[in-house]
Image (spheres, helix red, strand yellow):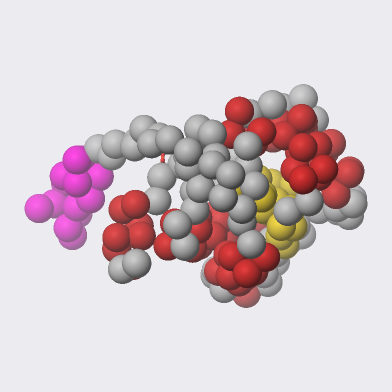
């Protein structure tokens, strides 16, 4: 798929997934895309856990209680490390975001869908519960979860504000 077509086709999918499995080859390619993302000072702070064991998928789905998770054929858990990398400054959220966007684009290019689950993890200790049964070290945090599969239905496509509202040339409001 052409790069710009991939960007425009990517969208967060929250519906049911079909029975099409997600192979280790696909997961490996997607993880490589995450690993290739830029990170502050190239400290490569995010790590990734790909899940394809049905019993672990079920445990994560049980914690998250998000309908999209119950039919996911695989998941990628993005684990952050908030250690400072530039003086006292840590860029762990930005590093995770860059990696996640690379992985979402890779999934789209390979014919799979996902959704960026972040907010839901921050409630009721859900991130901590998942971290515990995945054996994530105490100094790292489960930051983002990507449920993965081939959509069973057409999900809605989120719209964007018009170009002129968000993008300018040379100065704010410049045309
Ligand atoms: C930082 C961040 C956090 C997000 N957290 C969630 C989330 O917890 N649950 C969810 O369903 N979608 C989440 N999303 C997905 C956004 O809702 C989605 O990207 C947005 O509605 C635009 O839709 P699109 O990705 O389909 O273009 C998150 C996206 C970002 C960038």
For the point 58% across and 70% down, the residue is: 29
Q: How many tags in the picture? A: 0
Instruction: Using residue 114 as the reference point, say whether residue 138 is left or right of it.
Output: right
- Any part of residue 87 in sight: no
- Any part of residue 92 in sight: yes
For the point 67% across and 65% down, the residue is: 24
Q: Is residue 146 magenta?
A: no
Instruction: Using residue 99 as the reference point, say whether residue 108 is left or right of it.
Output: left
Above or below, 108 relative to 73:
below
Residue 25 location (% of width, % of height): 63, 69
| Residue reaching furthest to the front | 19
Front-most of residues 146 and 121:
146
Quadrant including the N terminus: bottom left
Specify the principal SS of the magenta part: loop
Residue 96 sits in which quadrant?
bottom right
Above or below, 40 relative to 124:
below
For the point 55% across and 40% down, the residue is: 17
Front-most of residues 41 and 141:
141
Residue 170 location (% of width, % of height): 18, 60
Residue 115 location (% of width, % of height): 53, 42
Residue 49 location (% of width, % of height): 74, 57
Magenta stretch, residue numbers? 162-175
Residue 95 sits in which quadrant?
bottom right
| Residue reaching furthest to the left | 175
For the point 29% across and 36% down, the residue is: 159
Above or below, 122 relative to 104:
above
Instruction: Using residue 22 as the reference point, say whether residue 158 is left or right of it.
Output: left
């Amino acid at each position: 798929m052409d790069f710009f077509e991939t960007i425009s086709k990517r969208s967060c999918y929250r519906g049911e997934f079909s029975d099409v499995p997600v192979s280790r080859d696909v997961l490996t390619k997607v993880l490589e895309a995450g690993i290739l993302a830029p990170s502050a000072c190239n400290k490569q702070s995010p790590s990734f856990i790909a899940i394809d064991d049905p019993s672990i998928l079920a445990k994560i789905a049980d914690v998250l209680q998000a309908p999209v998770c119950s039919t996911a054929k695989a998941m990628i858990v993005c684990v952050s490390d908030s250690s400072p990398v530039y003086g006292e400054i840590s860029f762990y959220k930005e590093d995770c975001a860059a990696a996640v966007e690379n992985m979402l684009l890779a999934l789209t290019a390979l014919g799979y869908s996902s959704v960026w689950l972040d907010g839901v993890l921050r409630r009721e200790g859900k991130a901590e519960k998942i971290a515990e049964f995945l054996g994530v070290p105490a100094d790292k945090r489960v930051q983002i979860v990507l449920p993965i599969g081939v959509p069973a239905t057409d999900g809605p496509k989120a719209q964007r504000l018009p170009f002129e509202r968000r993008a300018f040339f040379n100065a704010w409001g410049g045309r």
